[in-house]
Image (cartoon, grey):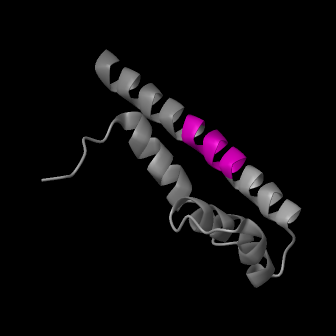
Amino acid sequence: QPDVIMSAELQALNLAIAAQPMDTARKVFILTYVHEVSPVKAAADALGISRMTWYRHLWKFRESVYIAHKAILAENLACRAELASE
């Protein structure tokens, strides 16, 4: 039995995150939200980037995930509507 009930929107978000490339932006996202690294400056130094670059990567990744999430959700809803009309 799952720990939480997955909504269609949460599933689309999870898929959007999983579909992103494993680049520096994704590493920054994982370090920020999964591992909750602190201080950011030390984590950024470990990746060989500045603190400001860390935040730019984080913003870029979140923006990419949001766009992909909305596209996945829209496609799923369009497919559901098409199935209902048949």
Instruction: Look at the picture and state if 30 lies above or below 11.
Output: below
User: Toward the viewer: 79 or 60?
Assistant: 60
Question: Which portion, as a residue range, is magenta?
Answer: 62-70
Quarter of the image with the C terminus is top left
Q: Please identify the quarter of the rendering in which residue 32 is found.
A: bottom right
- Residue 68 in percent (x, y) is at 61, 44
Q: Residue at x 69, y 68 (%)?
A: 39
Res 62 visible:
yes
Residue shown at 36% from the left, 27% from the top: 80
Which of the 4 image quarters holds residue 69? Answer: top right
Where's residue 14, x and y in %? 46, 51
- For image coordinates 72% across by 56% down, the residue present is 58
Q: Residue furthest front?
A: 39
Front one among 19 and 56? 56
Residue 21 to residue 83: above or below? below
Would you identify the image quadrant in which residue 82 lies?
A: top left
Decide whether the magenta segment is chiefly helix, strand or loop.
Answer: helix
Whether 51 is among the magenta residues is: no
**What is the tally of numbered marks visible in this picture?**
0
Residue at horizontal 37%, vertical 36%? 8
User: In the drawing, does residue 5 fall left or right of residue 64?
Assistant: left
Q: Residue 9, percent across and down?
A: 43, 35
Q: Nearer the viewer, residue 47 or 1?
A: 47
What x and y, as percent, mark residue 66? 63, 41
